[in-house]
Image (cartoon, helix red, strand yellow):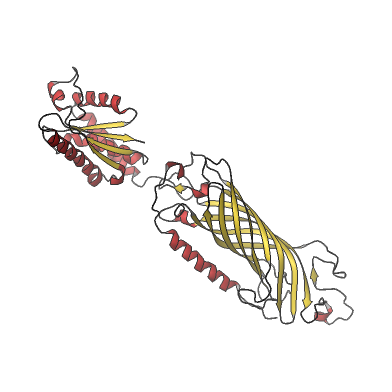
């Protein structure tokens, strides 16, 4: 018999859907990613889920009259799936499905039932893009490749009268009383025997939609390639039998409801697709910069007044990194020696991606209050400009605040006359998590 070859067309259709999903996945999200959404190996996330689904099971065998979709007879199958996510990008799932199978062509038809059990590697496509994470916090697109087995029974019939085909109809041996059946007694086709088995390789894609913390909806399409050619009882086909299974499913995410599931977290730039911490691209340069800066700081004259002032500021700002930059009377330009404090702050920001920075400008009470407010703003903007344009810190991480003469720092008897004079002409760089 001439075998139809719909599998190639089916795969092309799957690839078309895959390319469309990838294109959608490249669109930027427009909402704020909160800390509990960010993936980290140190954090605890839910990782197990169970799914149930239902959908069409389409056979492609030597006895098939269609090239893609059945033109008359449709069979549907339920499935159950347990998934374990290793990290946001990769998972394994254990799937079981069972249903009827059917195909007809050239005066014959076969019918039977099949049980399918597979284990598959699952990859979340959008976690592998330039901006890893769920799209709009609602959509995940995935592929899967697996391995498993099937257990099935089938009988071959004549289309004209529904009678069973016998071996002698092919061999010409009139004494041969065996029937063309699998999983049934060859001489008594009403009696079930041990199911026939076959190896199967599922390859497919899918999409899932996040409903809430507990449930997801999904659609999954897989072409399941058999390593044998016998589902339809015809062993003379040009290639092995296969079938296409599509299911619409609902998933329940197992675990504590106050924690996110790994597949709905956002992998930061500090982690590779396997969820492991990756080396920061500029780590070596930052380390060299830090060493050079420490060497310079160790050999420059110590600004005693600055040390005393920063010590007092830490009492005000609490558990935060604080760096102060000082200015001359009415000045808004950063002195060369104060670039060290800005560089030290930049190093901390490069090493700790979660830190946010507030640049706070101050002025003494010399002159009108409105002018002092403007001077403090310009001082803060000058420090921000160096952080962003000279040291490469993202402007989105920086908040600028001008306080003018509204919060004067009380001088102490430990300061020199020069220190007392400059204590309020400063910008505080405050780093917090």
Where residue 247 sits, quadrant-wise, is bottom right
Q: Quadrant of the C terminus?
A: top left
> Which percent across, then down, holds residue 34?
42, 43
Report whether residue 117 is seen.
Answer: no
Decide which of 337, 329 is in the foreground and name it: 329
- Determine whether, in the image, residue 352 is placed left or right of residue 225: left
> Which percent across, then down, holds residue 203?
58, 63
Give the farthest residue toward the right: 175
Residue at the spot 52% in from the left edge and 50% down from the top edge: 263
Q: Quadrant of the N terminus?
A: bottom right
Establish if 25 lies above or below 388. Answer: below
Where residue 288 sits, quadrant-wise, is top left
Across the whole image, how many numbered discs are drawn on residues?
0
> Which percent across, then down, holds residue 115?
71, 60
Decide which of 21, 336 is in the foreground and name it: 21
Residue at the spot 33% in from the left edge and 43% down from the top edge: 284
- Determine whether, in the image, residue 77 is placed left or right of residue 357: right
Establish if 381 lies above or below 309. Answer: below
Report whether residue 256 is seen.
Answer: yes
- Determine whether, in the image, residue 241 is placed left or right of residue 387: right
Residue at the spot 33% in from the left edge and 45% down from the top edge: 282
Establish if 409 lies above or below 161. Answer: above
> Which percent across, then down, holds residue 291?
28, 36
């Amino acid at each position: 018999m001439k075998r139809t070859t719909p599998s190639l067309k089916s795969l092309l259709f799957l690839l078309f859907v895959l390319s469309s999903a990838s294109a959608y996945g490249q669109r930027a999200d427009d909402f704020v990613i909160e800390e509990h959404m960010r993936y980290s190996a140190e954090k605890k996330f839910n990782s197990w889920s169970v799914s149930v689904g239902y959908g069409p099971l389409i056979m492609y065998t030597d006895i098939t009259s269609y090239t893609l979709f059945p033109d008359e007879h449709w069979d549907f199958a339920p499935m159950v799936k347990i998934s374990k996510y290793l990290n946001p990008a990769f998972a394994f799932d254990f799937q079981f499905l069972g249903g009827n199978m059917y195909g007809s062509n050239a005066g014959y038809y076969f019918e039977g039932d099949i049980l399918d059990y597979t284990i598959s590697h699952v990859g979340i496509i959008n976690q592998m893009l330039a901006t890893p994470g769920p799209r709009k916090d609602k959509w995940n697109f995935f592929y899967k490749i697996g391995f498993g087995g099937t257990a099935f029974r089938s009988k071959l019939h004549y289309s004209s009268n529904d009678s069973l085909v016998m071996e002698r109809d092919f061999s010409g041996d009139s004494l041969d009383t065996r029937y063309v059946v699998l999983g049934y007694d060859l001489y008594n086709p009403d009696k079930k025997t041990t199911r026939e088995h076959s190896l199967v390789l599922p390859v497919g894609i899918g999409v899932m939609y996040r409903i809430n913390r507990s449930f997801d909806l999904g659609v999954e399409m897989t072409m399941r390639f058999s390593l044998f050619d016998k589902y339809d009882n015809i062993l003379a086909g040009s290639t092995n039998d296969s079938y296409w299974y599509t299911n619409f499913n609902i998933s329940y995410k197992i675990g504590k409801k106050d924690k996110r599931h790994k597949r709905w977290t956002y992998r930061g730039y500090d982690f590779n697709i396997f969820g492991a911490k990756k080396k920061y691209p500029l780590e070596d340069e930052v380390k060299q910069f830090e060493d050079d800066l420490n060497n310079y700081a160790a050999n420059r004259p110590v600004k005693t007044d600055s040390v005393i002032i920063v010590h007092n500021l830490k009492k005000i700002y609490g558990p935060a990194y604080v760096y102060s930059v000082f200015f001359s009377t009415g000045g808004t330009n950063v002195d060369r020696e104060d670039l060290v404090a800005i560089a030290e702050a930049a190093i901390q920001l490069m090493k700790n991606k979660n830190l946010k920075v507030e640049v706070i400008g101050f002025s003494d009470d010399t002159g009108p209050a409105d002018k002092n407010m403007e001077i403090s703003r310009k001082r803060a903007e000058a420090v921000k400009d160096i952080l962003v344009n000279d040291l490469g810190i993202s402007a989105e991480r920086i908040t600028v605040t001008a306080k003018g003469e509204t919060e004067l720092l009380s001088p102490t008897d430990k300061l020199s006359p020069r220190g007392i004079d400059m204590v309020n002409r400063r910008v505080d760089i405050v780093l917090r998590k």
